[in-house]
Image (tube, grey):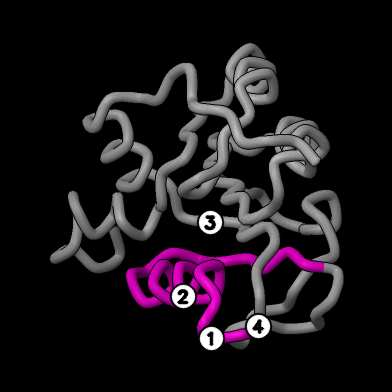
């Protein structure tokens, strides 16, 4: 098992706000159908605030009324943000897939950071946010704005 790293870099707040204002489609990798799980709560919050969520977990057919895909490469439409809810050792192949599908942003949820994968994503032209919760960041900066 890999231990979690500390992020070597995160975008400043204004770049995070810019990401949240300009993205529409967010793939939630590692989503759970259990309502008490963070991944489920974050996805529900994002959906309620006007984002299109795409659940990604091979265990499920559907989550929150949306078709669930087994992996990023199975998603038949463009994805803006890949929001990761997986163990650190699962991050490198997810980031590789995010790059290959043309995602704009890789977002590693609170407590998750993988600097080597982050650097690879940045070199491929993606923005990277590590160890921050997209729901918390949205609430902090854009709480009163629906539809971003």
Q: Please report the residue visible at 66 percent of the width from the left and 75 percent of the height from the top.
A: 32
Q: Which residue is mark 2?
A: 41
Q: Over which residues does the magenta segment extend?
A: 33-57
Marks 4 and 2, how far apart at CA: 10 Å
Task: Tell whether label 2 touches label 4 (CB within 8 Å).
Answer: no
Mark 3 / mark 2, whichever is N-terminal:
3
Judged by depth in the image, the label closer to the viewer, 4 or 3, is: 4
Judged by depth in the image, the label closer to the viewer, 3 or 1, is: 1
Mark 3 / mark 1, whichever is N-terminal:
3
Q: Which residue is mark 1?
A: 35
Marks 3 and 1, how far apart at CA: 21 Å
In which quadrant is the N terminus drawn?
A: top right
Q: Please report the residue visible at 61 percent of the width from the left and 85 percent of the height from the top.
A: 34
Q: Position of residue 35 (x, y in %)?
A: 53, 86
Task: Tell whether label 1 touches label 2 (CB within 8 Å).
Answer: yes
Marks 3 and 2, how far apart at CA: 17 Å
- As for residue 73 lying within the magenta part, the answer is no
The answer to whether residue 93 is above or below residue 21 is above
Q: Which residue is mark 3?
A: 25
């Amino acid at each position: 098992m890999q231990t979690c790293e500390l992020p070597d870099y995160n975008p400043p707040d204004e770049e995070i706000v810019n990401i949240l204002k300009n993205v529409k489609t967010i793939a939630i990798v590692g989503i759970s159908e259990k309502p008490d799980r963070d991944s489920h709560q974050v996805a529900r919050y994002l959906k309620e605030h006007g984002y299109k969520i795409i659940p990604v977990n091979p265990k499920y057919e559907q989550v929150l009324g949306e078709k669930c895909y087994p992996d990023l490469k199975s998603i038949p439409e463009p994805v803006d943000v890949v929001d990761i809810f997986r163990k650190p050792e699962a991050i490198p192949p997810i980031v590789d897939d995010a790059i290959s599908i043309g995602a704009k942003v890789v977002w590693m949820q609170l407590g998750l950071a993988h600097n080597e994968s982050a650097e690879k994503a940045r070199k491929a032209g993606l923005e990277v946010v590590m160890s921050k919760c997209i729901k918390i960041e949205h609430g902090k900066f854009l709480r009163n704005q629906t539809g971003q």
